[in-house]
Image (spheres, helix red, strand yellow):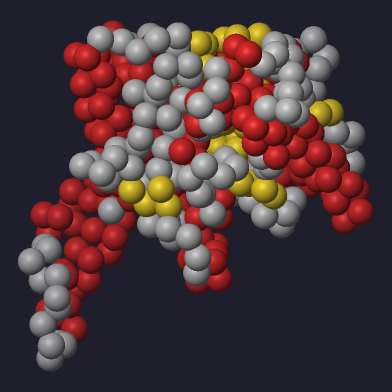
Amino acid sequence: PVLLFHRQRDGPWWKRIISFLAVSLFVLIFVVGCLVFPLWVLSLLSSVAPSLGTVAPFPFSFLGPTSLSVSTVLLCLPHLFSAVGMSDPRTLHDKRGLLVGQRAVMKLLEWVRDWMAAGSAMVLDTDGVLKAGEGGQAPTMVCLHPHGIFTLGLTMLGPLFEVKDFTLVFAHFLYWLQPVLRLLLDPILKTASASRASVNALMRSKRNFAIIPGGFHEAVITKRATDRVFLSKRKGFVKFALRHGYSLTPVYVFGETDSYTNLQGGWGVRFLLSALQLPAVAFWGLWFSPLTPRRARLVAVVGDPIQLPRVENPSKQQVDDWHRQYVDALQRLYNKYKHAYYRAEQHRQHGLHPAKCPPSPRFDCKACVAVDRRKLEVW
């Protein structure tokens, strides 16, 4: 394994305060950005309501032209930057004034990563992902699991994105109607929508890209101290990889689900809302700051790329077979590293010292048995 990043110890108290403020600001920016489109809709209705001659007053009549103008500008700004090339990291690197903003965003994300507990790391199981798209190797689709509430594991993949050119693909709703997220990410990372047309365009150009196959459904099933992925019905990414001859690189982030507590149950309604691009999560983090994640130890493990053949029109059987192989590879990656991640924690919970056990599990040790029984749930 190749260790690209490892945080061995916590910083001093003043650095922890800065990282707390940074991660709180990052999450707040994300939440506020999700409200821009609803604000635009309500402002538009408030502006046209008087002309409709409605008897009952519009409940959001306090919103007017000002809020409509501000929300319209925010929604259009990232697309305007993309149109003129200002969101391309290479373009920003050449402009002195914009480079300051680029460095500020990188520093903010570095402080967000510093909020994670000591021991957080990023591990490459092999160096295969570093060779993707080069020297005759097929380009790769990096598949990140689990989604979690805010996908904090993406901050752990920062070192990989620094040494390898990747495009981050995320939900269609977030790409088009969450402008603040793009304004934050576009200066340092190329982004794209997860729409069919956008993904096809990326694959035709043979670009490496990262995606979260579980999507909002995987966010909904997030449960603290439980490892879950939503993959049973997610086969579209495999079909795209077969059509274009891509490899699939599984990535699992240990500790992602421990950052927040998420309400369980009501799956039918919540899955329906998620299908409508409305993530139905009910979460809380720190007791005094619910939006701020707990200081979990995040370890992102990047597996070996799985090379798929190029099949222009793959059959359902072919998609099912390769999907099964991908899920098996993700399970193997999880089982390979779960002892290294959970071993110390389980020994502490059982009042034992991990040094008394070798790296391989001992089945006369309660802690080792508890880790061995831990499974990755595939929904």
Q: Residue at coordinates 63% horizontally, 13% vertically from top-left?
A: 356
Image quadrant in which you'd find residue 180 = top left
The answer to whether 160 appears left or right of 246 in the picture is: left
Compared with residue 341, is residue 42 higher up or lower down, i.e. above or below?
Answer: below
User: What quarter of the picture does the C terminus occupy?
Assistant: bottom right
The answer to whether 77 appears left or right of 241 in the picture is: left
Q: Residue 308: horizontal and vertical position, in percent?
A: 85, 33
User: What quarter of the picture does the N terminus occupy?
Assistant: top right
Compared with residue 353, is residue 197 higher up or lower down, i.e. above or below?
Answer: below
Of residues 370 and 307, the one nearer the viewer is 370
Q: Residue 216: horizontal and vertical position, in percent?
A: 52, 52
Q: Residue furthest bottom?
A: 55
Image quadrant in which you'd find residue 370 = top right
Image quadrant in which you'd find residue 55 = bottom left
Can residue 338 be spotted in the picture? no
Tag count? 0
Q: Residue 258: horizontal and vertical position, in percent?
A: 46, 38
Q: Residue at coordinates 75% horizontally, 37% vertically from top-left?
A: 331
Of residues 115 and 275, the one nearer the viewer is 115
Q: Residue at coordinates 40% horizontally, 10% vertically from top-left?
A: 9
Q: Residue furthest left?
A: 62
Of residues 56 and 235, the one nearer the viewer is 235
The answer to whether 56 appears left or right of 180 in the picture is: left
Can residue 346 be spotted in the picture? yes
